[in-house]
Amino acid sequence: MDAILLARIQFGFTISFHIVFPAITIGLASYLAVLEALWLATGRSVYMTLYRFWLRPFAVAFAMGVVSGIVMAYQFGTHWSGFSCFAGAITGPLLTYEVLTAFFLEAGFLRVMLFGLKRVGPGLHFLSTCVVALGTLVSATWILASNSWMQTPQGHEIVNGVAVPVDWLRVIFNPSFPFRLSHMVTGAFLATALIVGGTGAWHLLRRPGNAPARSMLSMAMWMLLGTAPAQAVIGDLHGLNTLEHQPAKLAAMEGHWEPGAPGEGVPLILFGWPDMDAEMTRHAVEIPRLGSLILTHSWDAQIPALKDFPAADRPDSTSVFWTFRIMVGLGLLMIALAFWGAWLRRSARLYGHRRFLRCTVAMSPAGLAAILAGWYTTEAGRQPWVVYGLLRTSDAASSHPAGQVAFTLGLFVAVYLMVFGAGTAYGLHLLAEDPADSAPAPEGGAGQSSQAMRPLSAAQEGDGHGN
């Protein structure tokens, strides 16, 4: 392995951790806002019980997301200095906007959200939860704007070999941005729904009458039923956008090598093994013309093939082909689980069908796995470009010896597995606790019995006697 490949592996390794935790916080923050809104509107204690239960896993995921993001950002200067020099005038301000808006917004209200339930009134605490949820979405918007510009760049000029912004609206709202943002946010909601639903199902398998777990599972299945089919539609639109702006990536995703004759249509390759050296997909299992129907919504239209592009401009079809199918396959399983849950709900068996509950537990990590598979498809499919059509990966990398990059990669793997492994284990421990054991809400509503009226009153939260 040369230094560039090792640097790519290191960045892929660190960004994989960073994607997972913000995806959880995006979904959980909105879920917590919904729970508190329902509690304030209905007064039902089960919603506050669930709020308290999920608040601690949210805090753990939020902290790990911040840490992983800071570490990842340093690599732009250490391993990818060529990219920083070329695109820093665009990506730098976009990441700065993310810090100035989303990060400061979240930091300003996060403490109130985490520790202020018994210190401030219900309205202010609910506002804090909503602001934190909004902050996670704003953060995703800026990050996806930066990454989408790297996929479909526009609104810039090349001056002395450097990309200079000339139209920020076109930079931000580049052709792939709306599809990638909606795809990512919907994926975060899906991943969270599966985690919430799997947690509820796990507790119901242990104690069928667990009321908070029943509410957890019910809400998750409603979310899954709405977002899983919607994600399929968004994915289809995203595919059409990719066909228009990144045809080589789409050809690699489909394992499509040979240009076809007009009118014969493109088959859909369900499974196979793209061979980059032989320039063919071995052992292909095909459905005639279905590729044209899905990709162009036409029975006989053609799409660009990998052989339409120089070998140096082709992504690695072997990896992209399979990561794309993992993502799609998991998405189909999510849709199946959602409709299975809807059918069981109609027959009043949602909470007692043990096979369904076990499948829901097994599907808990599927949303995160699908996000990672989709991200690998997007990033590896962009190769050999870092900024599509403008800056090659070989020109973006820093000139470090392979041994040094290998050392830092090994160090990252060891430290990440230790730190984030411990954090993940602690988060799973929190989910294993019985939600029914969560502390009840203060009598009279949030903030009613422990409203901080003087500076030191917040310290008197022990046994009610100042202990």
Image (cartoon, rainbow, N blue to C red):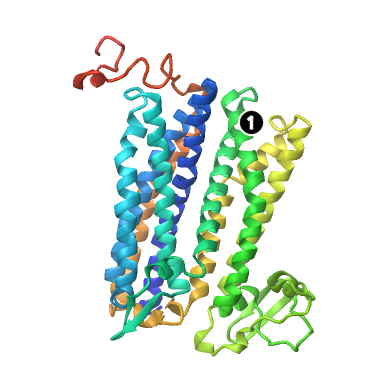
Q: Is residue 242 above or below residue 182?
A: below
**Left or right of 229 on screen, residue 421:** left
Residue at screen point 43% across, 75% down: 154
Residue at screen point 50% across, 45% down: 27
> Residue 338 location in percent, x, y?
69, 44
Report crowding for label 1: few under 14, some 14 to 19, many 20 or more residues within 10 A (C-alpha). some
Q: Quadrant of residue 426?
A: top left
* Residue situated in front as seen by the camera: 370 or 358: 370
> Residue 99 location in percent, x, y?
31, 54
Q: Is residue 10 visible?
A: yes
**Left or right of 454 on screen, residue 347:** right
Q: Is residue 411 visible?
A: no
Which residue extends farthest top?
465
> Residue 377 location in percent, x, y?
54, 68
Give the residue type at disc 1.
Leu
> Residue 460 location in percent, x, y?
25, 16
**Left or right of 423 on screen, residue 107:** left
Q: Is residue 197 above or below residue 66?
A: above
Residue at screen point 38% across, 30% down: 125
Q: Is residue 454 above or below residue 221?
A: above
Tag 1 residue: 205
* Residue situated in front as seen by the camera: 265 or 98: 98
